[in-house]
């Protein structure tokens, strides 16, 4: 009896000590952060430059009057956006970006396409109004905080997940942004887009702290037939269903446009397929999703999905099947593939420190190269860089191929941020194989530093593929050809490698996010593509 009391006392003291330690550690971290805050803010202001002080997005009426985009050029863009090329019944990204991407610039250089994009952006800034439906939830955990200096300094984890918050914050800095009051009457012919008041990524992480989610995870070990896999995601999907249902009752615009012109943003792996699982079919077919998960094909088998409503009463209603097929997966005719890294400070450091290569005359007519030749010409230390977990056979094969290749920097464990940045900065090629999904922040982060992405993700629809030809910016390798990757890289001439680096660094600002919306940045380009797909190109079809 005495031993039992002593054991309980010791256990209680140990638990109390652990709690005190965690609290003290948290308090000390906060104090250190606050003590360093003023100095960190100053360094951030110097790093971000004009971005730190506010947005530079304006409607330039004079430019609009003097530089109207040619109709034929806009028609070519619309052809790509609404009618991507197909292969075996599925949209083919490589064929589409090779055929259409930068088509207006071919023969005239990337600068011409950049000018066309600038003209279209100005048209959008002058004409487009983005209406945000009122946010009705009282649970602040479901709403992303407005992007701030503190959040940028404290950002951690997967930088791709930050993009939902960044786009939402940046969107509110557009020249014509408004929260939609219920009494507003809008004319039918107007350049308007409607943002749904849902934030699936933020909500999913919030739901992970709910007791029902923890209870579901506990039950999964004992009664798997009564539980829902990824219950946090399905609760977010149910929130979206309810929100769309409420909007259709309170506002006329959803029904009037049959779900067109409406959109939501998510940076979670679930993407369209998971978060629209219970949504109104009208929105599923006609609405848009701005998403990182731009996979055209769902890789795993159909999952048996249970209606989340049944968990309110624990009824014995039969599960429903959600078919993972179009339009539930990413639809390039409606959805927008967004830039993948919300690491604002990393992008700013890349802009500050890395400049474009100068292609000397000795390399302009070179043939297939060697590792040493490429390293000497580019002034970089590593031939190939990869850092990540071995999640699938594609990654495993790549590691086997390059593990012992001279000049390769392959890391399979976590390491410090500085080491990761050094790998990006000092490497010629950065391997970007698919993980659980086709996307990875390393694709954009490689681009920031002029490290040529080697992409192995067959069904992934890359961002801005109709504006730029990705086959000239990256090396796109079919997953079936993974073992030929080294040979493919060495068959490239020095001039071709350096031209890719040059073009990547020329265009990288279009794939970077900022604290404040900047003209032509990743948020602005996502809204431009959405505006073209849902408004401009649809109007041309009439």
Image (tube, rainbow, N blue to C red):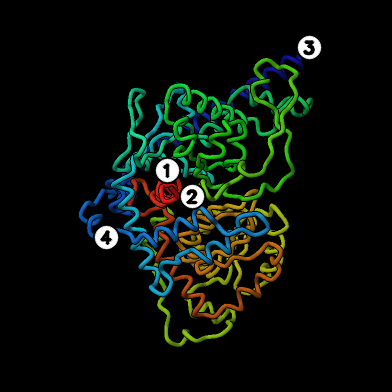
Residue at 54% in and 67% down: 471
Q: Nearer the viewer, mark 3 or mark 1?
A: 1
In three-dimensional space, the C-alpha distance between marks 4 and 3, rounded to whole angstroms, equals: 89 Å
Q: Earlier in the sequence, mark 3 or mark 1?
A: 3
Element carrying mark 2: loop
Residue at 62% in and 60% down: 411
| Residue 105 in view, yes or no | yes
Q: Is residue 413 left or right of residue 141?
A: right
Position in image of residue 191 (x %, y %): 35, 42
Dot 3 surroundings within 10 Å: few (below 14), some, or many (20 or more)? few
Q: Earlier in the sequence, mark 4 or mark 2?
A: 4
Dot 4 surroundings within 10 Å: few (below 14), some, or many (20 or more)? some
Q: Which residue is mark 4?
A: 67
Q: Nearer the viewer, mark 4 or mark 1?
A: 4
Q: In the image shown, does 28 or 205 lie closer to the viewer? A: 205
Are the residues at dot 2 and dot 1 in contact (C-beta closer than 8 Å)?
yes
Element carrying mark 1: helix
Q: Which residue is mark 1?
A: 167
Residue 69 drawn above or below residue 231: below
Q: Nearer the viewer, mark 4 or mark 3?
A: 4
Q: Earlier in the sequence, mark 2 or mark 3?
A: 3
The residue most toward the top is 1
Q: Which mark is residue 338?
A: 2
In three-dimensional space, the C-alpha distance between marks 2 and 3, rounded to whole angstroms, equals: 64 Å
In three-dimensional space, the C-alpha distance between marks 3 and 1, rounded to whole angstroms, equals: 62 Å
Q: In the image shown, does 305 or 360 lie closer to the viewer? A: 305
Residue 265 drawn above or below residue 316: below
In three-dimensional space, the C-alpha distance between marks 4 and 2, rounded to whole angstroms, equals: 27 Å
Q: Earlier in the sequence, mark 2 or mark 1?
A: 1
Position in image of residue 42 (x %, y %): 30, 48
Q: Which residue is mark 3?
A: 1
Q: Quadrant of the N terminus?
A: top right
């Amino acid at each position: 009896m005495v031993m039992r009391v002593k054991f309980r006392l010791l256990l209680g003291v140990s638990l109390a000590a652990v709690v005190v330690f965690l609290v003290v550690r948290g308090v000390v971290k906060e104090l250190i952060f606050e003590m360093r805050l003023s100095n960190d803010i100053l360094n951030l202001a110097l790093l971000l430059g004009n971005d730190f002080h506010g947005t530079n997005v304006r409607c330039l009426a004079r430019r609009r009057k003097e530089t109207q985009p040619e109709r034929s050029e806009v028609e070519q863009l619309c052809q790509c956006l609404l009618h991507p090329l197909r292969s075996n019944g599925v949209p083919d990204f490589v064929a589409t970006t090779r055929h259409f991407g930068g088509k207006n610039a071919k023969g005239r250089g990337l600068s011409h396409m950049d000018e066309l994009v600038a003209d279209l952006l100005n048209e959008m800034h002058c004409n487009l109004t983005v209406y945000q439906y009122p946010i009705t939830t009282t649970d602040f955990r479901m709403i992303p905080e407005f992007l701030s200096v503190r959040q940028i300094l404290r950002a951690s984890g997967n930088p791709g997940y930050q993009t939902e918050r960044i786009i939402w914050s940046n969107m509110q800095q557009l020249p014509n942004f408004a929260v939609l009051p219920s009494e507003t009457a809008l004319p039918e012919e107007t350049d308007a887009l409607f943002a749904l008041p849902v934030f699936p990524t933020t909500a999913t992480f919030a739901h992970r702290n709910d007791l029902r989610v923890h209870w579901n995870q506990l039950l999964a070990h004992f009664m798997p037939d009564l539980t829902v896999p990824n219950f946090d995601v399905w609760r977010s999907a149910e929130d979206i269903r309810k929100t769309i249902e409420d909007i259709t009752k309170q506002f006329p615009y959803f029904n009037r446009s049959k779900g067109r012109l409406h959109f939501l943003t998510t940076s979670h792996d679930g993407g369209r397929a998971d978060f629209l699982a219970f949504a109104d079919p009208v929105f599923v077919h006609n609405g848009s999703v701005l998403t990182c998960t731009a996979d055209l094909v769902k890789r795993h088998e159909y999952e048996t999905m249970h209606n989340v409503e049944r968990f309110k009463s624990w009824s014995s209603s039969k599960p429903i099947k959600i078919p993972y097929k179009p339009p539930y997966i990413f639809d390039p005719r409606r959805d927008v593939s967004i830039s993948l890294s919300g690491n604002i400070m990393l992008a700013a450091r890349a802009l500050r420190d890395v400049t474009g290569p100068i292609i000397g005359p000795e390399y302009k007519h070179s043939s297939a190269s060697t590792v040493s030749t490429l390293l000497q010409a580019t002034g970089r230390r590593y031939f190939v860089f990869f850092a990540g977990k071995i999640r699938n056979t594609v990654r495993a094969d790549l590691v086997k191929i390059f593990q012992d290749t001279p000049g390769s920097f392959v890391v399979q464990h976590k390491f410090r941020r500085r080491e990761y940045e050094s790998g990006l900065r000092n490497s010629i090629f950065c391997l970007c194989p698919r993980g659980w999904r086709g996307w990875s922040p390393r694709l954009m982060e490689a681009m920031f530093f002029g490290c040529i992405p080697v992409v192995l993700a067959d069904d992934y629809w890359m961002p801005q593929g109709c504006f730029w030809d990705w086959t000239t910016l990256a090396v796109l390798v079919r997953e079936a050809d993974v073992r030929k990757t080294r040979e493919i890289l060495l068959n490239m001439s020095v001039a071709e490698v350096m031209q890719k680096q040059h073009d990547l660094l020329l265009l990288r600002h279009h794939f970077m996010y900022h604290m404040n919306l900047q003209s032509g940045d990743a948020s602005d380009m996502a809204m431009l593509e959405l505006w073209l797909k849902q408004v401009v190109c649809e109007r041309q079809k009439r």
